[in-house]
Amino acid sequence: MSTETISALSAEQLAALLAARLCHDLVSPIAALGAALSVLDDDDSSDMHDDAMGLVKESAKQAQAKLEFSRLAFGAGGSAPGILDTRELQRLTEGMFATVKPEIVWKVESPGLEKAAARLLLNMAVLGVEAAPRGGTVTVEGVDAAGGARLQVVSEGRRAKLEDSVVKALAGEEPEDGFDGRSVQPYYAGVIARGAAGRITARIEGERVEFVALVAPPEER
């Protein structure tokens, strides 16, 4: 990682906040799974067993999708370097956000992205979804750029928003109220970008929020 990377958080703080973020994302499907299993164990609730079994299947599916997505977006996702198939990135993204309000529009042109760019794109998709809490569209784009990549995520919808804390965190700066499980994610996206000798920016115009990132070729990092 570049020595010029801004380090507002220590490695220990970053790891702790990312772990808290991951646990928060998994609480809902795991809790629903536990509740459904309790109904199945209750003989007095036999009339609800079909609904409970449906909830078990849906909750397990959601938990798996979140884990698969997070493994690459926040973790190593396999230690080997190389190019990741963007069809797999699309599958992970659509699975992760299958239940959210905004529609994911996948327009990634490149058949594959280098791992750092792929991880950054997934993190940008998270930012895009959170910028459109009332629904709309989140358009995900990515193209090769002379061995590196240019990535863009655009959120459009009613009351689309871009928090000041997100802008600061992307730049490696501590938000006014400090870091938490929400602001650590854009901070981590910025770390990935700068570690790949690139940058990430965000801007809002009306009800349109745009995240753009540039990533240098591996040999230039």
Image: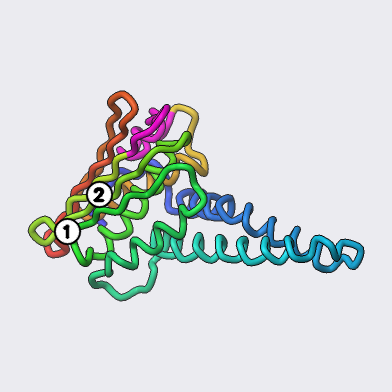
Residue occupied by mark 2: 194
Task: State the image quarter where residue 208 is shown.
Answer: top left
User: What SS does tag 2 mark?
Assistant: helix
Left or right: 31 as drawn, with respect to 85: right
Tell me if residue 167 is in the magenta stretch. yes
Q: Which of the numbered marks, if any, corresponds to residue 97?
A: none
Q: Is residue 44 above or below residue 141?
A: below
Q: Residue 150: image x %, image y %?
A: 18, 51
Q: Residue 98: image x %, image y %?
A: 48, 54
Q: How many marks?
A: 2
User: What SS does tag 1 mark?
Assistant: loop
Residue in view at x 90 percent, y 68 percent = 43
Q: Earlier in the sequence, mark 2 or mark 1?
A: 2
Q: CA distance from mark 2 to mark 1?
A: 9 Å
Task: Please tell me how crowded label 2 is: few (under 14), some (14-19), or many (20+) other residues with Cα within 10 Å.
Answer: many
Residue occupied by mark 1: 221
Q: Which residues are magenta?
A: 155-175
Q: Viewer-proximal residue, 81 or 66?
A: 66
Q: Quadrant of the N terminus?
A: bottom left
Residue in view at x 80 percent, y 60 percent = 48
What amino acid is at disc 2? Answer: Arg
Q: Residue 84: image x %, image y %?
A: 27, 69
Residue in view at x 18 percent, y 48 percent = 214
